[in-house]
Image (cartoon, grey):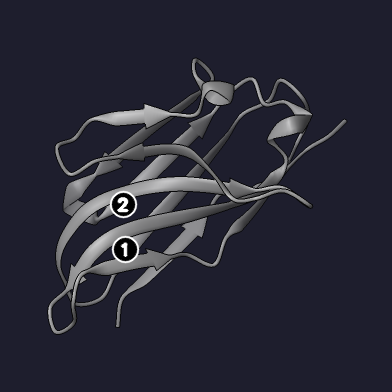
Amino acid sequence: QVQLVESGGGLVQPGGSLRLSCTASGSIASIYAMAWYRQAPGKQRELVAGYTRGGSTNYADSVKGRFTISRDNAKNTMYLQMDSLEPEDTAVYYCNANLRPITRPRGDYWGQGTQVTVSS
């Protein structure tokens, strides 16, 4: 069974930093893409940053220059370094992976989410 597990969320003051991690585990044949999404109260889930299989990255305009996505392929782990955090970044952050398990078809998988709260 495939699982995505996030960690690293918490409470931080405006201007502070947090680093989120997401590890994919289980019987995985291939990972095609991974991304971070977030959902604030009363709002739709939105893409924050992501990788394509080709290795290119993309960021939401609202986080460009402040957030950095990275990954360790050997560990099936993706990171999101969040700097200069603003109250508007408060949300539940979700890890997403488009992958193919060994015994199942390719599909989208989600983590359980980690809360990030930016407040003084």
Q: Amino acid at mark 1?
A: Ala
Q: Residue furthest front?
A: 44
Residue at x-position 67% and y-position 26%: 85
- Left or right: where does residue 39 sit relative to residue 53? right
Distance CA(mark 2)–CA(mark 1): 6 Å
Residue 117, picture quadrant: top right
- Residue 69 at x, y percent in the picture: 39, 33
Residue occupying the far top of the picture: 65
Q: Residue at x 49, y 19 (%)?
A: 64
Q: Which residue is mark 1?
A: 24
In what element is the residue under mark 2? Answer: strand
Give the structural element (helix, strand or loop) at label 1: strand
Q: Vertical placement of 47 versus 26: above or below?
A: above
| Image quadrant in which the N terminus is located | bottom left
Picture coordinates of residue 92, whole percent (x, y): 65, 52
Up/down of 73 relative to 28, above or below: above
Q: Is residue 32 left or right of residue 92?
A: left
Task: Name the foreground residue: 77 vs 50.
Answer: 50
In this rendering, the answer to whether 37 lies above or below 118 is below
Residue 103 picture quarter: bottom left
Q: What residue is shown at x 49% (from left), y 58% (from top)?
A: 6
How would you rate the neighbour count of disc 1 (Cα within 10 Å): few for under 14, some for 14-19, many for 20 or more?
many
Q: Earlier in the sequence, mark 2 or mark 1?
A: 1
Question: What residue is disc 2 on?
Answer: 77
Q: Are marks 2 and 1 in contact (CB under 8 Å)?
A: yes
Instruction: Name the image quarter holding residue 87.
Output: top right
Asked whether 41 or 93 is in front, the reply is 41
Front residue (pair 33, 118): 33
